Amino acid sequence: MNYDIWFNGSFVPYEDAQIHVLSHVVHYGSSVFEGIRCYETEKGSAIFRLPEHMERLENSAKIHRMQIPYDLDALNEAVIDTVERSGLPECYIRPVVFRGMGPMGVNPLENEVDTVVAVWEWGKYLGDEALEQGVDVEVASWNRMAPNTLPAMAKAGGNYLNASLVKMDAVKNGMTEGIMLSTNGYLAEGSGENLFIVKDGKLYTAPVGLSILPGITRDAIIQLARERGYSVEEKTIPREALYVADELFFTGTAAEITPIRSVDHYTVGSGTRGPITKELQDAFFDIVEGGNDPHDWLTFVDVP
Ligand code: PMP
């Protein structure tokens, strides 16, 4: 099923949400976007951390000198309206802002900026069994881009050429995902997920300075882990820490909390989901499925 799309302030049918082939974004990858989930919780449908996602969208646009013609309130409302109009109790939400028509050439400053919000049904990103069984991954041969090449804090379309290379290689190699190293050789993140290591009861994850996307699920897991008494350190971690980890997991809007059961054919821990991964998954799903919301992370919506 295809749902109406919010396009520059009004709803258009799915088939009519089109752009010209000479739009700047088609040639130069000049978009910024978000990925958000709306969950059917036991207390009604709710969007997970909507304001944080829309703030990140605004930051991404600002970094790329893109003026979004709508303020935060209007963008939040556009998302809520799009979800409610779809009637979907649970969906994936994709706001995207891109450089449209204008002069041809690299300089985008005179091109129009278009804003879109679309929704669709999306199941488990890394496979139905991934959340319990874990996934098999490899260290990617492509690095995450260096901090002085592309701003990694921006969730920008062009960055995903890097991510796509990693993901395609992984799939061709029979793996579910690739883990990128930073250009100085430290662990960064997956093509669309942040990475956590559990060792001796403590959690470790890469710092934002290593060209990772500051994930909103990453932030949630750091908070949930600390609340449960775990130490969480954001630090530079060498590759081989993967091979001796007790547990590894990815976090992301699409991937949620996905255990990793092998890396480069090394078995991680016991080769199944570890106990701390499970505890944090349970804490996360208590919010997004149970609808229990002590952190005020849920925006409830009205779907029939
Ligand atoms: N890193 C990258 C490269 C991503 O694309 C994503 C997905 N947005 C993440 C990390 C996870 O971020 P979040 O938890 O905000 O979805």
Image: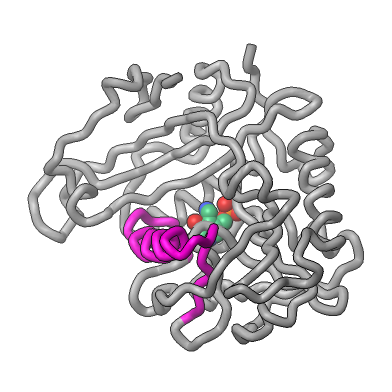
Q: How many marks?
A: 0
Relative height, residue 182 to residue 95 (above, below): below
Q: Nearer the viewer, residue 291 or 195?
A: 195
Q: Is residue 77 left or right of residue 110?
A: right
Q: Magenta includes 286?
A: no
Q: In what quadrant of the picture does the C terminus appear?
A: top right
Ligand 1 shows up in the quarter that is bottom right
Q: Is residue 135 left or right of residue 33?
A: right
Percent x, y of residue 285: 78, 42
Using the rendered view, name the quadrant where residue 156 is placed.
bottom left
Percent x, y of residue 132: 75, 50
Residue depicted at 59% across the width and 36% down the height: 123
Q: Which residues are magenta?
A: 153-182
Percent x, y of residue 94: 46, 38
Residue depicted at 44% across the width and 83% down the height: 183
Q: Magenta includes 172?
A: yes
Residue depicted at 71% across the width and 49% down the height: 131
Q: Nearer the viewer, residue 109 or 266?
A: 266
Q: Is residue 109 left or right of residue 300?
A: left
Using the rendered view, name the quadrant where residue 22 is placed.
top left
Relative height, residue 187 to residue 2 (above, below): below
Relative height, residue 121 to residue 11 (above, below): below
Residue depicted at 86% across the width and 79% down the height: 200
